[in-house]
Image (spheres, rainbow, N blue to C red):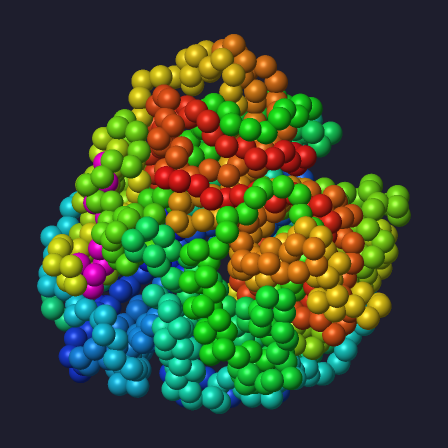
């Protein structure tokens, strides 16, 4: 109950659970101003060179400069009302240096030669001051200078060029569809982000990137006033590294799941999902309360992604393994000694987990990370065995490796970059196998779709997950909806209970748009791909209570 | 310099309002200077200083509202930001819930600013880190900590003549100590408006003791246990409950405060009669701002008295809909304690668990306020009035409403995250599984 939480949540109360905690960066501008081009790339190079040259002249052995322009547009509605439309712009430069083997960082919104010189001097002063108590001098893995290059998220429709009225109409149509189908309340929102990032370093890279992300959300509430009960059902769309074309509702990207659940791949039908949300929220009011016990779980990708995020993505971040996050997010059970055995069985032998910063449509896809490393794909778990971590330039030497994994990120020009999670995904099964085949093979199980409540311990052993919708499976068939379902397991036990994975035709992304880490905390966005997957004999509890 | 005096702030805001051409205009001016130090592996990892100041202008034409922000305050910039807010207002759809700016209000005196905190230097922060790291090394443990201190001001003014100003300081410290064999972990937190009262050194020593005491924890069966919750263990559950005291969601039927058949639980007893939960912005130990961000005066107010719901929060819009006075969201939570010391709570416990903190707390069911999470950094088994041994961490699934109905004993209050929370002994607290995490 920190004071700032009080302030942040003020006036929202329980309603706040309907809106994510949203960081708002930068100054408000009009939607039209989003379209004004930023600083010319030739000027950016000149400005970055001011930082690099100043740093060198003051004794830095390495320096990088990130000139960032961050454009956000958020639209919030409830029922038939527009609650807020926010357009923001944030522009500035962050300069990071190494002096006396120690990092220093400073930033400024004054992107002028004088402003940049001053900030560079501050970064050097911090590095030199902190070097007095430095015990482990920075060792950077080598990087080849890339020269002057550009990279762009391959989008079809830039959200900045789509009129706000079109977005408002879409959200209000979805809300109206939900209300017509029995919803008592509905909240919907669109989050759209464009990062225009320019990176330069003393290694000889000048990298200009244009990155887009989008996240539509909808949350429907159905109420039984006579009993004082209410249930919510949130949308089954995902945040994506795509343009506004994600909202085009293309039939080719629709997937029919068990129990008539409609799921979405690279295009989202928000109105259709709103109708289903309303119908299913009402159905949840009278659904059977689960009998606790062991079940075979059939987990849909939009659900499984969060379990991958918490039980694989985070524990395999090297800074956590080493103790740098001990006072906040925690450490990790996946210690270096386990990895060194080359035999640590993270999961069953069908489990292959990969980190990947290049997948098209994913939130984490960029050409180069925030320290100029070309992005790539690499294995974390192969045939069930732990084979690698996620690490950046100043960490990989601790793994006796000499190439950064390219997963360094900062949420803005104003914050220092550090190791963040890559897209971490479960490879699909190699044999032809659909979700309907999978359901047929389950005797006593539960099919879970969509994300719900989540909690995991500080070393990532014990976790508990809920979901959005649950269907009981008996003798190979879906027999009806369940409520009050949560499963508890242990990371190693859970991934070793992984029995079967559907093929690539079922592969989809889920994502998290505002993942928090560090002190002071920074957000990042990351996707997790998977196909529907079966886990045998998982402990399910009943979360129903009377108060 | 990001900190403006009352008169400097007034002058900037008056100038901004002088450019207004909209039906009404409201401006908020905030600034802060903050410094931090972060350490891990017994070494400083990052240190930083942040300075920011922002003027937010809200202009409205009828119920069409626009907001614009700026961080430069010369006349040209002020005029630019007001014009921009007005342009955005004209482009906006009508917001039927928009409320016109308020008439001038009377505010209580604020006690949130302490000069010593405003004068904290980088060396003071380094000393806090050294006071953790040196004793840690001596006891074969590893320190990881974070200190943040801030010097802030907030001001607001509107075209109806309302003016409010507040200065505040704050310091927050958290420390984790882990034994070098990886089997023990301890944690402590402190926060204060006055840096000199933070006592980070004492917190570091407590965390070291807890780390050493929690080495080689034994597993015991999960289930329902009597627990002694340190204030850091209950504060988040209580905060989550407090944040749900929202009149609108209760009236709408989508809150644990909603009643069967409609209406709210206002006036009903929902927890043990010894539970009193209230707010007081002028409380000497947890002072906070005497006005909310939209200008509503904050004052002492009961939310639970004798276990009965006494008040819910009403936004200005919802208060008008319901014909009542608005109730701003409180800036602190105070729960009355009792006389029993921690030692006496332990002595009177036949079989129970002492919990340092609960972590990764997430809502499982908003209907019943059921939350899940885990114990962390110091969990101990009590038998026959004595701490017997450390135990492995548990996952819990519990509702603060059920917890406060199962209240056994109240202990002394402690300041935590700007709130005042007592030690509590609770019976039948539900642990549902074991965790191997240290």
Residue B70 vertical placement versus B86 (above, below): above
**Residue toward you, A98 or B331:** B331
Residue occupying image coordinates x 50% and y 74%: A273
Q: Is residue B412 visible?
A: no
In the rendered structure, the answer to whether residue A291 lies left or right of residue A389 reads left
Residue B24 vertical placement versus B367 (above, below): below
Mark count: 0
Q: Position of residue A103 (x, y in %)?
A: 65, 55
Q: Position of residue B272 (x, y in %)?
A: 30, 29
Residue occupying image coordinates x 26% and y 51%: B261
Q: Looking at the rendering, in which quadrant would you find the N terminus of chain A?
A: top left
In the rendered structure, the answer to whether residue A5 lies left or right of residue A536 reads left
Q: Looking at the rendering, in which quadrant would you find the C terminus of chain A?
A: top left
Q: Position of residue B162 (x, y in %)?
A: 14, 62
Q: Which quadrant holds residue A96?
A: bottom right
Q: Is residue B314 visible?
A: yes
Residues rendered magenta in the picture? B308-319
Residue occupying image coordinates x 56% and y 88%: A157
Q: Which quadrant holds residue A326?
A: top right
Q: Which quadrant holds residue A396?
A: bottom right
**Residue toward you, B390 or B219:** B219
Residue A79 vertical placement versus A473 (above, below): below
**Residue toward you, A498 or A210:** A498
Residue at the far right in the pictured view: A342
Q: Position of residue B239 (x, y in %)?
A: 37, 43
The reply to whether the magenta stretch includes residue A537 is no
In the rendered structure, the answer to whether residue A322 lies left or right of residue A119 reads right
């Amino acid at each position: 109950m920190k004071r700032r939480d009080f302030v942040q949540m003020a006036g929202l109360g329980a309603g706040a659970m309907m809106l994510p905690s949203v960081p708002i960066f930068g100054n408000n501008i009009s939607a039209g101003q989003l379209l004004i081009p930023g600083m010319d790339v030739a000027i950016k190079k000149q400005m970055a060179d001011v930082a690099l040259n100043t740093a060198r002249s003051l004794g830095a052995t390495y320096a990088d400069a990130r000139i960032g322009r961050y454009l956000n547009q958020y639209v919030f509605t409830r029922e038939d009302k527009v609650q807020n439309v926010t357009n923001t712009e944030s522009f500035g430069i962050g300069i990071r240096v190494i002096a006396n083997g120690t990092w220093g960082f400073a930033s400024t919104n004054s992107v002028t030669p004088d402003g940049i010189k001053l900030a560079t001097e501050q970064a050097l002063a911090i590095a030199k001051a902190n070097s007095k108590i430095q015990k482990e001098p920075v060792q950077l893995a080598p990087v080849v200078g890339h020269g002057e290059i550009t990279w762009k998220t391959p989008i079809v429709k830039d959200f900045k060029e789509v009129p706000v009225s079109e977005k408002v109409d879409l959200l209000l149509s979805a809300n109206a569809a939900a209300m017509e189908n029995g919803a008592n309340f509905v909240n919907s929102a669109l989050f759209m982000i464009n990062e225009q990032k320019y990176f330069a370093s003393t290694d000889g890279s000048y990298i200009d990137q244009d990155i887009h992300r989008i996240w539509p959300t909808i949350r429907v509430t159905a109420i039984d006033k006579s009993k004082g009960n209410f249930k919510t059902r949130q949308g089954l769309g995902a945040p994506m590294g795509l343009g506004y074309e994600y909202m085009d509702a293309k039939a080719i990207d629709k997937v029919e799941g068990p129990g008539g659940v409609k799921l979405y791949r690279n295009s989202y039908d928000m109105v259709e999902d709103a109708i289903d949300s309303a119908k299913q929220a009402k159905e949840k009011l009278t659904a059977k309360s689960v009998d606790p016990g062991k079940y075979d779980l059939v987990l849909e990708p939009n659900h499984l992604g969060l379990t991958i995020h918490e039980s694989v993505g985070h524990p395999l971040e090297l800074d956590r393994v080493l103790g740098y996050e001990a006072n906040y997010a925690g450490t990790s059970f996946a210690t270096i000694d386990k990895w060194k055995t080359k035999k640590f069985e993270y999961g069953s032998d069908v489990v292959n987990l990969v980190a990947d910063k290049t997948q098209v449509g994913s939130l984490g896809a960029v050409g180069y990370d925030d320290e100029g490393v070309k992005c790539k794909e690499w294995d974390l778990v192969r045939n069930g065995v732990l084979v690698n971590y996620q690490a950046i330039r100043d960490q990989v030497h601790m793994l006796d490796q000499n190439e950064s994994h390219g997963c360094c990120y900062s949420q803005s020009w104003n914050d220092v970059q550090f190791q963040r999670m890559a897209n971490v995904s479960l490879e699909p099964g190699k044999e032809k196998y659909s979700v309907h085949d999978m359901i047929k093979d389950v005797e006593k199980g539960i099919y879970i779709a969509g994300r719900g409540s989540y909690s995991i311990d500080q070393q990532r052993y014990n976790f508990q997950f809920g979901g959005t919708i649950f269907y009981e499976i008996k003798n190979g068939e879906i027999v009806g909806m369940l409520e009050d379902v949560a499963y508890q397991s242990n990371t190693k036990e859970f991934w070793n209970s992984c029995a079967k994975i559907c093929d690539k035709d079922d592969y989809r992304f889920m994502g998290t748009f505002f993942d928090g880490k560090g002190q002071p905390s920074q957000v990042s966005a990351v996707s997790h791909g998977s196909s529907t997957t079966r886990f045998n004999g998982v402990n399910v509890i009943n979360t129903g209570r009377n108060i | 310099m990001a900190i403006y005096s009352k008169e400097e702030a007034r002058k900037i805001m008056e100038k901004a309002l002088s450019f207004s051409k909209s039906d009404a205009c409201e401006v908020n001016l905030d600034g802060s200077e903050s410094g931090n130090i972060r350490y891990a592996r017994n070494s400083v990892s990052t240190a930083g200083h942040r300075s920011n100041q922002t003027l937010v202008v809200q202009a409205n034409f009828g119920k069409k509202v626009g907001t614009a922000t700026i961080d430069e305050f010369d006349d040209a910039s002020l005029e630019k930001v007001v014009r921009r807010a007005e342009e955005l207002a004209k482009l906006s759809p009508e917001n039927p819930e928009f409320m016109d700016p308020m008439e001038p209000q009377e505010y209580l005196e604020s006690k949130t600013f302490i000069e010593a905190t405003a004068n904290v230097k980088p060396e003071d922060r380094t000393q806090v880190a050294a006071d953790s790291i040196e004793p840690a090394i001596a006891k074969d443990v590893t320190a990881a900590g974070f200190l943040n201190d801030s010097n802030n001001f907030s001001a607001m003014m509107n075209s109806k003549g309302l003016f409010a100003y507040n200065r505040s300081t704050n310091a927050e410290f958290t420390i984790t100590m882990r034994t070098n064999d990886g089997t023990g972990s301890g944690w402590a937190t402190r926060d204060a408006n006055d840096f000199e009262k933070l006592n980070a050194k004492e917190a570091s020593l407590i965390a070291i003791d807890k780390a050493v005491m929690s080495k080689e924890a034994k597993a015991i069966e999960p289930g329902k246990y009597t627990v002694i919750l340190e204030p850091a263990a209950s504060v988040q559950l209580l905060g989550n409950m407090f944040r749900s005291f929202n009149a609108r969601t209760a009236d709408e039927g989508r809150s644990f405060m909603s009643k069967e058949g409609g209406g709210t639980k206002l006036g009903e007893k929902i927890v043990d009669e010894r539970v009193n939960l209230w707010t007081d912005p002028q409380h000497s130990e947890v002072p906070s701002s005497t006005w909310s961000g939209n200008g509503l005066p904050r004052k002492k107010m009961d939310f639970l008295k004798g276990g009965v719901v006494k008040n819910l929060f009403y936004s200005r819009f919802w208060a008008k809909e319901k014909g009542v006075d608005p109730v701003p969201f409180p800036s602190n939570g105070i729960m009355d304690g009792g006389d029993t010391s921690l030692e006496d709570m332990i002595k009177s416990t036949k079989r129970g668990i002492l919990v340092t903190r609960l972590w990764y707390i997430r809502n499982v069911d908003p209907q019943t306020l059921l939350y899940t999470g885990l114990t962390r950094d110091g969990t101990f088994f009590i038998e026959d009035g004595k701490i017997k041994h450390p135990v492995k961490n548990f996952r819990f699934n519990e509702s603060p409403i059920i917890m406060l109905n199962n209240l056994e004993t109240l202990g002394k209050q402690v300041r935590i995250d700007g709130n005042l929370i007592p030690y509590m002994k609770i019976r039948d607290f539900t642990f549902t599984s074991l965790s191997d995490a240290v």
